Amino acid sequence: MKKIVFLASILFITVTTYGQDRVFSVEELVFHGLTMDHLDSIYKNGLPVSDPNHQVFSQNYFDNLVEKARIDLLQKMGDYFKKNGFKWEKPVKCWNRIYFNTTGSIDYFVYHFKDKIPDNKENEFKRLLNSFIKNNKVSVNAPQKYSLCGIVSWTD
C-alpha cells in the first residue's frame, strides 16, 4: 500500500510539474491552488537587497551575471513571440515574477498587464510563453530556488 501511495505521489508531482501550464496571471493563481505568498515561501527573493543577511546572490554576482541573464531571457521571449507571429500592436507594460529552480529553469511565470488586453491576445501570450519556457532557462545556477520580478514593456 505504501508503494502505491508513493508512486501516486510521484506521478502527481510529475504531472503537476511537467503536464500543466506554468504561466499564470496573478488572478489565475487561485484557480490552480496557488498563491504568491505560498510560492514566495518556497522561492527566495533573488534580489540581494531583499534580505542582506541571507542572500541568494551577492550584489556583484547579481549585477554582473543574474540581471544580464534575466534580460537575455526576456529578450529571447520577445524574439520567440515575433518568430511565432505574435504582434502586440502597441507597447504593453507587464509586471512579472519569474520563479526559477536551482538550475535556472522556470517553474512559474506570474504576470499582470498594466492595462487590459484582449482575451485572445492574452491566451496566445500564455500559450507561447508556456511553450517557450519548456526549452529555455537562465544561464544561472543557484544554491536554492529563487524568484525575480520586474516590469517589461513588450513591443513588436
Image (spheres, helix red, strand yellow):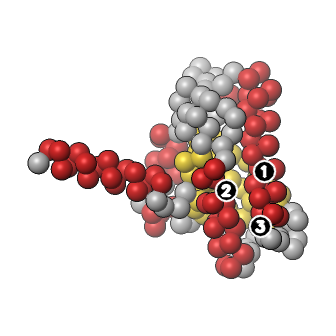
Q: Earlier in the sequence, mark 3 or mark 1?
A: 1
Q: Position of residue 48 (x, y in %)?
A: 68, 28
Looking at the picture, how far across and down is residue 146, in whole percent?
58, 37
Q: How many marks?
A: 3
Q: Is residue 56 above or below residue 92?
A: above
Q: Which structural element holds mark 3? A: loop
The amino acid marked with disc number 1 is Lys
The residue that appears at 74% across and 41% down in the rendered structure is 70
- Between 114 and 2, the one nearer to me in the picture: 2
Residue 13 visible in image: yes
Q: Which residue is mark 1?
A: 76
Confirm or deny contact between disc 1 and disc 2 (CB under 8 A): yes
Identify the residue under disc 2.
Answer: 132
Q: Secondary structure at mark 2?
A: helix
Quadrant for the C terminus, please. Answer: bottom right
Amino acid at the residue labelled 2:
Phe
Q: Residue furthest left?
A: 1
**Disc 2 from disc 3: Cα separation:** 11 Å
